Image: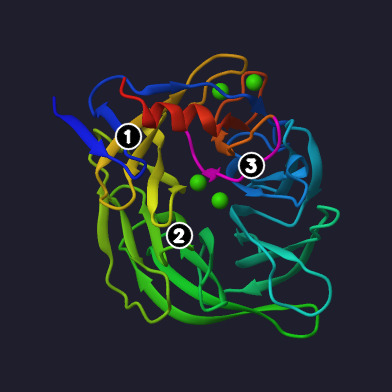
Amino acid sequence: MRQILTPIAAGFIAVSCAGEAPLELEAAVETVRVASNDDAADDPAVWVAPNPQDSLILGTDKQAGLYAYRLDGSIAQNLPVGEVNNVDVRYNFPMPGPARDIAVASERTNIGLAVFMIDPQTGEIEAWPLIDLPDFADPYGACLYHSSTGAYYAFVTDKDPGTVVQLLLRYDGEGVITGDEVRRFATGSTTEGCVADDRTGMLYIAEENVAVWSIGAEPDAGTELSLFAEVDNVHLHADAEGVAILPEGETGGWLVVSSQSANTYAVYELETGAPAARFQIVDGLHDRVTHTDGLEISAASLGSDFPEGVFVVQDDEEDTGGQNFKIVDLRAMRTQLSDPQ
Ligand code: CA
Ligand code: CA
Ligand code: CA
Ligand code: CA
């Protein structure tokens, strides 16, 4: 099998053999399970608080609503707004009055984009009116992009045709966030996970059985997708689910993709798309992660337990029942990406 030798931004060498056993991680914390039975937990996001140890993990229960978890996995808040599937966060949304952070989630009960405003002083999350997506069948994926122009955008994917819309988000002066469509394109088949890199203005989208695609995140970047990584069933196995970025420096780092049927995470060098490593989360203090779904990375310092951030993933089968989210110390992932095995 082919050995992949990848120079990375910090000057280290990451080595991985695509066909060999994945590198191992263990969860440091697991959240309380979501209340709904069967397939329910889907996608996380991380909200970084001004006081880092007060940061929250947001996690969707795709049958019921949004959870906010403390870093010890306990529930801080539960917002039963409907069938929210994917969730994402950005900071300091432009609006009058005290600063507010924003979270959005694709919402399949009322067909739209659920909007949540977060008070950075208290960490309290408030559900705001939904942004309707009248011509959507099934809002599936969602992610946010904060442009260097200052604008805030949401990308929402429609499950079956693979349609992707880009919405310009604005405060309309009446306690409502509006989302004007500024671009529309399509992948061709079931599409869910996405992530925007605010540093480089690039968007990455996972078409479950086909590929991870990239495209410029500005609304004038056209509609043509570039192949970033194929679902080759060697490094990346269907379904390609959640996607997240582990940043390094100004433009570097890695793209991490949930490789669902292999119970692994495929890691690519962000700047070249070269495969860098595969990870799995094995039994340890907490049970292993299987049939992995949504994921998120925050490289922000989150206090003494997670000084270099977290890697958060959905676990399809919590060993005490139901589904939950597992939190991995990002140092463990960085160390293995940076040290030859
Ligand atoms: Ca997410
Ligand atoms: Ca999912
Ligand atoms: Ca498990
Ligand atoms: Ca457990």
Q: Which residue is painted at 32% across and 39% down in the image?
A: 11
Judge depth for marks 1 and 3 and give the one in front. 1
Q: Residues within 10 Å of mark 2 (few under 14, many from 20)?
A: many
> Label 2 to label 3, Cα distance in Å?
19 Å
Residue holding disc 2 = 197
Labels 1 and 3: the sequence-earlier one:
1
**Corner quadrant of residue 316:** top right
Identify which amino acid the numbered label 3 is placed on.
Answer: Ser
Depth order, front residue of 41/335? 335
**Corner quadrant of residue 17:** top left
Q: Which residue lies furthest to the top in this view?
A: 284
The overriding secondary structure of the stretch rendered in magenta is: loop
Residue holding disc 1 = 12
The x and y percentages for residue 192 are 45, 54
**Mark seen at residue 301:** 3
- How many numbered marks, from 0 up? 3
**Mark seen at residue 163:** none
Please state the extent of the stretch shown in magenta in the rendering. Answer: 292-304
Q: Any magenta on residue 293?
A: yes
Element at label 1 = loop
Q: Which residue is painted at 50% across and 65% down in the image?
A: 156
Q: In this view, does 257 lie above or below 145?
A: above
Q: Which residue lies furthest to the front in this view?
A: 11
Labels 1 and 2: the sequence-earlier one:
1
Identify which amino acid the numbered label 2 is placed on.
Answer: Asp
The x and y percentages for residue 308 are 58, 37
Q: Is residue 134 above or below residue 8?
A: below
**Corner quadrant of residue 96:** bottom right
Are the residues tagged 1 and 3 within 8 Å (C-beta)? no
Residue 291 visible somewhere in the drawing: no
The x and y percentages for residue 71 are 72, 35
